[in-house]
Amino acid sequence: MQDISVEAAQVKRALAEQGLETPMLPQDKTKNERRNEIQQKMQEVLTLIGLDLSDDSLQETPKRLAKMYIDEIFSGLDYQNFPKITKIKNAMKVSERVQVNDITLTTTCEHHFVTIDGTVAIAYYPAKWVIGLSKLNRIVDFFAKRPQVQERFTEQLLVALQTILETQDVAIYVNAAHYCVKGRGIQDSNSYTITSAYGGVFLNDREERKEFLACVRHK
């Protein structure tokens, strides 16, 4: 088994210590073995639904689902896929807030396995380190690529960034629509869910939090 990066190990440990890790089992099978088993089981599921898998439109669907689960939408369950993070010493002594808005979020509801989509805003005050802006997007993408609940996802981002940046001064804001609400059950197509998580100055200073939120909402 290939080792995970130092940053991935630190984040994984921090999440576990705070009870925020996604519930996961250790895997003793290769990715190819898991794909094959998922493909076989999805054939059974689709047949039980009532689909005719001999149709040329459906023949490859179990295989497509297996590949999608392992290699794509749930690849964030494997810390070997944690993004490479290049930290840069804050030699410029940056002291003002760094904020990125409207980071695309597409994840999967762990209760019904349907889509959650929306946006994420992240802010932090550099202490020892700064990281490339695109790394924030990549960290969001990593935690989005696993079955999720929005509340835990939001807290995972906070702890991951606090761990990597070695500062408590991080803020997270998530605005998302849940297709388990839009497409089933109540079938409310207009509602959306907002979650936030704050550390350091964002948690302790109401004015700082208000300024962050004002920038999130400014279009």
Image: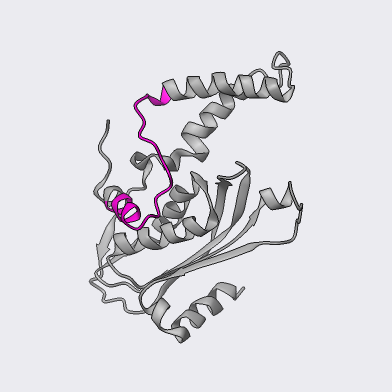
Instruction: Please tell me how many numbered marks the rendered image carries.
Output: 0
Q: Is residue 168 above or below residue 144?
A: below
Image colouring: one colour
At x 71%, y 25%, the residue is 49
Examine the rendering and report whether any part of residue 100 can be seen.
no
Reply yes or no: does residue 67 show up in magenta: no
Kindly indicate the quadrant of the structure image that contains residue 61: top right
Quadrant of the drawing holding the C terminus:
bottom right
At x 42%, y 41%, the residue is 77
Q: Is residue 66 above or below residue 4?
A: above
At x 73%, y 47%, the residue is 183
Q: Toward the viewer: 92 or 218? A: 218
At x 50%, y 82%, the residue is 211
As drawn, is 159 to the left or to the right of 140? left
Residue 34 locus on image (x, y percent): 45, 24
Q: Is residue 137 above or below residue 23?
A: below
Q: Is residue 52 above or below residue 100?
A: above
Residue 112 locus on image (x, y percent): 62, 43
> What residue range appears in magenta?
10-32
As drawn, is 123 to the left or to the right of 187? left
As drawn, is 44 to the left or to the right of 209? right
Residue 1 locus on image (x, y percent): 27, 30
Reply yes or no: does residue 20 show up in magenta: yes
Q: Toward the viewer: 192 or 5? A: 192
Q: Toward the viewer: 36 or 105? A: 36
Residue 32 locus on image (x, y percent): 43, 22
Furthest residue in direction top, as rendered: 54
Examine the rendering and report whether any part of residue 185 can be seen.
yes
